[in-house]
Amino acid sequence: MVLSLSLPLAACGAEDGKDPEERQPPKRTSAPAPAPESPEDFLALAAEAMAEEGAWTFSVKGEEGLTHQGQRSAASYRATVRRAMAPQALYSQGVSISSKGVKKDEEIYVADGTAHLRDGDAPWKAAPASDSEMRNKVEDAVAVIEDFRTYARAATGDGVKPVLVDGAVELRVRSGEERLAAVRDRSWVKKAVREFEPTAEQLREAGIPVDEAQVTLSGLEEVLVLDATTYRIRSYRFTFGFLVPYGGQDIAFDQDVRQENQGVFEGEIEMPAGVR
């Protein structure tokens, strides 16, 4: 009986003299994801990481000014931005301070391709989110991911460069002093020109000619900072300047905008009262 019981066991458990463990198919292990290398790799990971949460909060601070013959006139801006991911929506509450110290509240709401703006006590006004004025007003660090994708696709020589610094990945574009006409077609320069245009128009209205053929880009740097582990956006900075020749000297325009990720926003982003 011992023999009769052992034969079936031998047939099932030791076929061809192999131990049962040896006959099992090899276990498959998933290969680790390749480490990101290109700007596109990092930007794809950033988009995925930001989409993991419903909404985010960013702090914004900015300053722009004009300097001529040693005299500087500057205005500043501070805001808190809530940014929903799906469906996309943005609500910003801020305050601007003019060169004369006058404060003015500002609210912005963006959804479904339309931007709504209220300056101070003025009524809400609406325009396509693609409108130049609205694009200058809306500070959206998440949308910068797509901007940098455009830069990476168009980049040559001095294009987007990922750099690992203190636990963060910095993606940046930069330019030194250049004649505007020589770099006008670069995507990141186009953004600076758009931001400068309202001031350029004010100068023209004051009788100061602003001819792009004569304007110099004094410098530009745009930096998107990602966490090196989670790839979430940490911060964003855009700074640039232009030199406008006038009266044998230059009128210098400069702008510096910075955004910091303050973390996940748990609330709902709703349309403000009065928006239609």
Image (cartoon, rainbow, N blue to C red):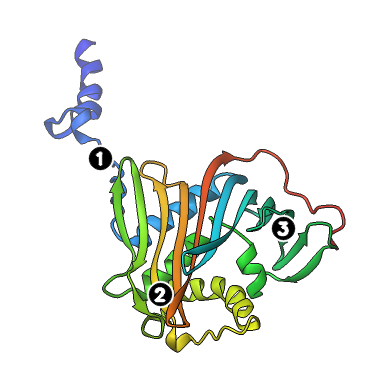
- Whether residue 87 is visible: no
Element under disc 1: loop
Res 11 → quadrant: top left
Residue type at mark 2? Leu
Could you classify mark 1 by the number of other residues whose Cα lies within 10 Å: few (under 14), some (14-19), or many (20 or more)? few
Quarter of the image where the N terminus is located: top left
Q: Residue at x 14, y 31 (%)?
A: 18
- Identify the residue position indicated by label 3 in the image: 108
Task: Identify the residue under disc 1.
Answer: 25
Say which label, 3 or 1, has the lower sequence index.
1
Q: Would you place residue 229 above or below residue 22 in this image? A: below
Measuring from the top left, give residue 135's x and y in whole percent. 62, 68
Label 2 secondary element: strand
Q: Which mark is residue 216?
A: none
- Asked if disc 1 and disc 2 are in contact, CB closer than 8 Å, the reply is no
- The residue carrying mark 2 is 217
| Dot placed on the residue nearer the N-terminal end, 3 or 2 | 3
Of badges 3 and 2, nearer the viewer stands 2
Question: Mark 3 or mark 1: which is in front?
Answer: 3
Up the image or down, 12 lies above or below 164; here it is above
Viewer-proximal residue among 188 and 105: 105
Relative image position of residue 152 (x, y in whole percent): 37, 69
Kind of residue at badge 1:
Pro
Name the amino acid type tagged 3.
Answer: Ile
Q: Is residue 83 left or right of residue 257?
A: right
Task: Please give left or right for residue 112 compared with residue 151 in the image.
Answer: right
Cα separation, mark 3 vs mark 2, equals 30 Å
